Amino acid sequence: MASNSSSIKVCGMQFAYEAQTPLFYDFNLDISPGSRCLLVGANGSGKTTLLKILAGKHMVGGRDVVQVLSGSAFHDTQLVCSGDLAYLGGSWSKTVGSAGEIPLQGDFSAEHMIFGVEGIDPVRREKLIELLDIDLQWRMHKVSDGQRRRVQICLGLLHPFQVLLLDEVTVDLDVVARVDLLDFFKEECDQRGATIVYATHIFDGLETWATHLAYIQDGELKRAKKLTEVDELKSSTNLLSVVESWLRSETKTEKKKPIKPPTQTQKTSPIADSPVKLGKFRQRREDNLPGDVRPKTGPSEGVLQGNCEKEVIRIDACGSSAVTRKVLDANTVVVGQDNGGPMCSRDSRVKTDLDGVGVVIGKVSQKVCKNLGDILANEEVILSPPRKVVR
Ligand SMILES: Nc1ncnc2c1ncn2[C@@H]1O[C@H](COP(=O)(O)OP(=O)(O)OP(=O)(O)O)[C@@H](O)[C@H]1O
């Protein structure tokens, strides 16, 4: 699916839910403008997680790892605020496009919700209300699932998106609503060059609707092609049976290995003797926060050289054992600044954890950080290299 100008570009993405083995490991994806890409895969293969990462709901790596419309999906909040990037998922209380967190089950009328979104082209709004056959008098706590879904979809589509991420949103719709909606999406791509990624298990009518297909198995991208280039579809026009055959032939692959602590720990050691050797430092500490499980295999990875199986998290501010535990729970080596005392040495739990972790290089600032959010909010922290090994 590669192209020179991409709507969505994912390069070497690593992602794990907390305390779990990595779901995505060196994941790459490239989707060009105007594509309607079906995202298929078995239950639990990672479709929803991928869509949420693309929607900027999970922070993964640095700014360049997950790019949507040439911006960082997580960091460039303007992408969502402007409505250029829209995500429609299964939950009623999630962010709906740029309309913010919408309480879809409160005692609101459909009219109140739809007309409450500011800056909308009235022609587009009328078109959507008609297309989705919405009765503006519907009370959201008394409607059917399908009716509520129509309002949710309408809200998500009010802004003319450039990239739309759909997570099985047509599941509650009747056939007429579904067909009309798919036609609308096609029009949006053909006429405005919008890009759609659609995760679904319902393939009716999608053979002629989709332009591309991305198939993931256990977080691994197994196929990413134009639909016309999928060999199996040349002999069968039935997408359902093709995907079914892929899923049936899936073998249970070995789960990706958790990041293990090193077998050897070093009691006291200069950096040169440490099992963890420092390479060059990244400029942004959020590159290495939990969720980013990239292996540190060489200088090109930016942080470590040598035989290290641990995550490295660089923080400038610590003092909160909660933060430290979070860091350490992810099997981390902590690299900190050299202008404070030893890493949280007053916290016995942390000291215990440190013993299990092995090597701590450098020291951390005494500055107290309330929670992980404080770190996330401070994007421009740059660390100086540590001067000695503490332990
Ligand atoms: N919040 C979470 N915390 C921990 N693990 C999660 C979380 N959400 C999903 N997972 C795990 O991540 C894996 C991928 O889940 P995901 O929801 O992305 O799959 P999916 O392909 O969308 O599945 P489905 O087709 O059933 O919707 C699963 O093993 C799931 O258990």
Image (cartoon, rainbow, N blue to C red):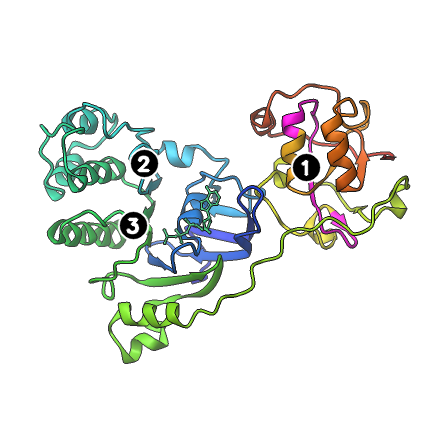
Q: Given this view, does label 1 or label 3 mark the residue nearer the observer?
A: 1
Residue under numbered circle 3: 168
On whether residue 299 falls in the magenta region, the answer is no
Decide if ligand 1 comes within 8 Å of the CB at mark 3: yes
Which residues lie in the magenta part? 304-323
Cα–Cα gap, marks 1 and 2: 35 Å
Residue under numbered circle 2: 97
On whether residue 315 falls in the magenta region, the answer is yes
Q: Answer with left or right where residue 84 lies relative to residue 263.
A: left
> Which mark identifies residue 328?
1
* Amino acid found under the numbered disc labelled 3: Glu
Q: Given this view, does label 1 or label 2 mark the residue nearer the observer?
A: 1
Q: Earlier in the sequence, mark 1 or mark 3?
A: 3
Q: Residue 52 appears in which quarter of the rendering?
A: top left
**Is 164 drawn above or below residue 374 in the view shown?**
below
Tell me if I can see residue 336 in this picture. no
Residue at (76%, 36%) from the top-left corner?
Answer: 354
Marks 3,2: beta carbons within 8 A? no
